[in-house]
Image: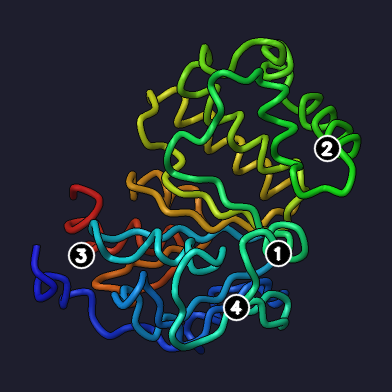
Amino acid sequence: MSADQYSVLGKAPDPEELKKLSSDDVHLTIKGLSAGYGKMVILHDFELIVGKAQSLCLIGPNGAGKSTILHSIYGFTNITSGAIKMHGNDITSLSPNEKLKNAGIAYILQDASIFPNMTVEENMIMGGFLMDKSSHARDQAEKVFKKYPSLNKRRNQKAGVLSGGERRLLEISRALIMNPEILLVDEPSIGLEPRFITMVFEILEDLQQNEGKTIILVEQNAKKGLEFADIGYVLVSGQLAIAGSGDELLKNPEVGRLFLGG
């Protein structure tokens, strides 16, 4: 599809409209962000507002810049203008390690990121590589194992023998070792069987509802992502085209036609 075919989505929402979708306890904001890789600019004057313990799902066509937003928040892109703030504090220029250790932002990669020749437990402890003492990582791993008994049963097995769903659970669990406030989740359902997709979204819902995590995710399965998320953003050509609650976007006929197979 060409960019013109998305013009039916209408005028991009302004910051005041985005603020209304957020809770009063604003957790993360992106203001006027232009970013990309090297000299290639992918995002253009992008805005985002999400409240504490809210979930926000980014959908759109391939190449729209969805993963680039996560990369920019985490410090993987070249930011040419704009600012990223957490609780009002500017974190734009922090490195990925600083984002994880000091700002409490964890990134769960789209690609399989486990170490297959290491045990499940060793993979978990790797999630605490920035902790001052390895014992702290082990203590935190025990807390996570207690939360996920199915993973605890496999702790001494090589991670390479895990099913796709178990691997995704390990990736999410490992990200919890540093006890982050914000989880950036890139394509959580990709490559998974339907039963594991349901499991993954149940885990994310638990982390949001019961542990107060703020979740920003990119999801290829737009319907599943919007059903989960409090807020939905539609991106086209590196810009925000439409925003609304997850339910609103699910009911939007043009969003349905373009992204939900309706």
Sequence order check: which comes first, mark 3 or mark 1?
1
What amino acid is labelled 4 in the image? Thr
Tell me the quarter of the picture where residue 40 sits.
bottom left
Gap between marks 2 and 1 measured at Cα: 17 Å
Sequence order check: which comes first, mark 4 or mark 3?
4
Q: Using the image, determine if residue 96 lies above or below residue 126.
A: below
Taking the image as shown, residue 191 lies to the left or right of residue 216, namely left
What amino acid is labelled 1 in the image? Glu
Category of crowding for the residue at label 3, using alpha-carbon neighbours closer than 10 angstroms: few (below 14), some (14–19), many (at least 20): some
Residue 74 percent across, percent down from the top left: 56, 63
Q: Using the image, determine if residue 172 lies above or below residue 13.
A: above
Q: Nearer the viewer, mark 4 or mark 3?
A: 4
| The disc label shown at residue 137, or none | 2
Q: Is label 4 in a helix, a strand or a loop?
A: loop
Gap between marks 4 and 2 measured at Cα: 27 Å
Taking the image as shown, residue 230 lies to the left or right of residue 45, namely right
Q: Quadrant of the N terminus?
A: bottom left
Decide which of 157, 46 is in the foreground and name it.
157
Category of crowding for the residue at label 4, using alpha-carbon neighbours closer than 10 angstroms: few (below 14), some (14–19), many (at least 20): many
Decide which of 177, 126 is in the foreground and name it.
126
Q: Is label 3 in a helix, a strand or a loop?
A: helix
| The disc label shown at residue 254, or none | 3
Residue at 65%, 72% (x, y): give it: 94
Q: Nearer the viewer, mark 3 or mark 1?
A: 1
Residue 141 percent across, percent down from the top left: 80, 31
Q: Is label 1 in a helix, a strand or a loop?
A: helix
What amino acid is labelled 2 in the image? Ala
Q: Nearer the viewer, mark 3 or mark 2?
A: 2
Sequence order check: which comes first, mark 3 or mark 2?
2
Category of crowding for the residue at label 1, using alpha-carbon neighbours closer than 10 angstroms: few (below 14), some (14–19), many (at least 20): some
